[in-house]
Every structure is written in C-alpha cells, then in structure tokens.
Amino acid sequence: MNLPNVITDLANAQNNFDSIAYANCFSESAEVFDEGKTHNGKAEIQQWIEKANTEYKATMKPLEYSEADEILKAEVSGNFPGSPIVLAYHFKLKDGLIDSLKITG
C-alpha cells in the first residue's frame, strides 16, 4: 500500500504511543473530529491523543487507502469494547501535513 509519508508517520506514532510525533503530523491550525468531539490546533490534538493512548492503548494497522478520497481504512486494536474494529480516517492534507482528520466507524 502506497501511503503518503505523513500518514505512515501518523500510524507509526500511534503504534509507539508517541503523542508528540503524532501531533507533529498536523498543521498548526489542524482539526480532528473523533467520538463526537472536535480538537483544534496541534497542542489540543497532542493532549487528546495522549489521553486516548493512556486510556485505550490503541494501535492501528492500515488496511487500504484511497488516494482520491484521502481515506485510510485501518484495523484499530486496544482496550476498548468491540476491539478490534475497522475505522475510516478521512484526511485533508496540505503542504505535507494533516490539516483535517475525521475518524468514523
């Protein structure tokens, strides 16, 4: 699977529970929508993923990527009900960074 570098970096950061490296995949003004909440800006994204890493210990295994739609389907495993689950990561990329991410089931 041919993923953009920043999405490969995001998956690696997630699997290493590295919230700083994860946040560095995003632009300064990026937005993440997950579990009904929006997280704005790199600092807030880092706080969100740090909390999620502590709570869920989730890892992601990319399954397929649509370059045209900028959607990654990944199997996510961790300590949460229903694990593992396949989630869709809807990206908007800008200048080699993630400008927007919406995670859906």
Image (cartoon, grey):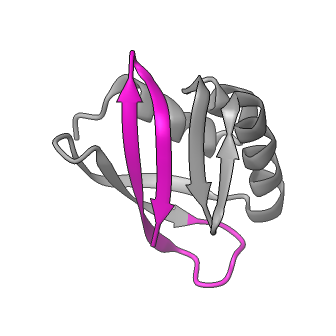
Asked whether residue 37 is drawn in magenta, I would say no
Outermost residue, top side = 95
Spot occupied by residue 71 in the image (x, y as percentages of width and height): 31, 50
Residue 29 screen position, x and y as percent: 61, 27
The residue segment tinted magenta is 77-105
What quarter of the picture does the N terminus occupy?
Answer: top left
Q: Closest to the observer: 21 or 32?
A: 32
| Residue 88 included in the magenta stretch of the image | yes
**48 is higher (above) or lower (below) than 100:** below
Whether residue 9 is visible to the viewer of this picture, yes or no, is yes
Q: Quadrant of residue 43?
A: top right
Residue 81 or 91: which is nearer the viewer?
Answer: 91
From this viewpoint, which residue is outermost toward the bottom? 82
Q: Is residue 18 visible in this depiction of the protein?
A: no
State the count of labels. 0
Point 32% across, 28% down: residue: 4
Q: Main secondary structure of the magenta part?
A: strand
Percent across and percent down for residue 42 are 69, 29
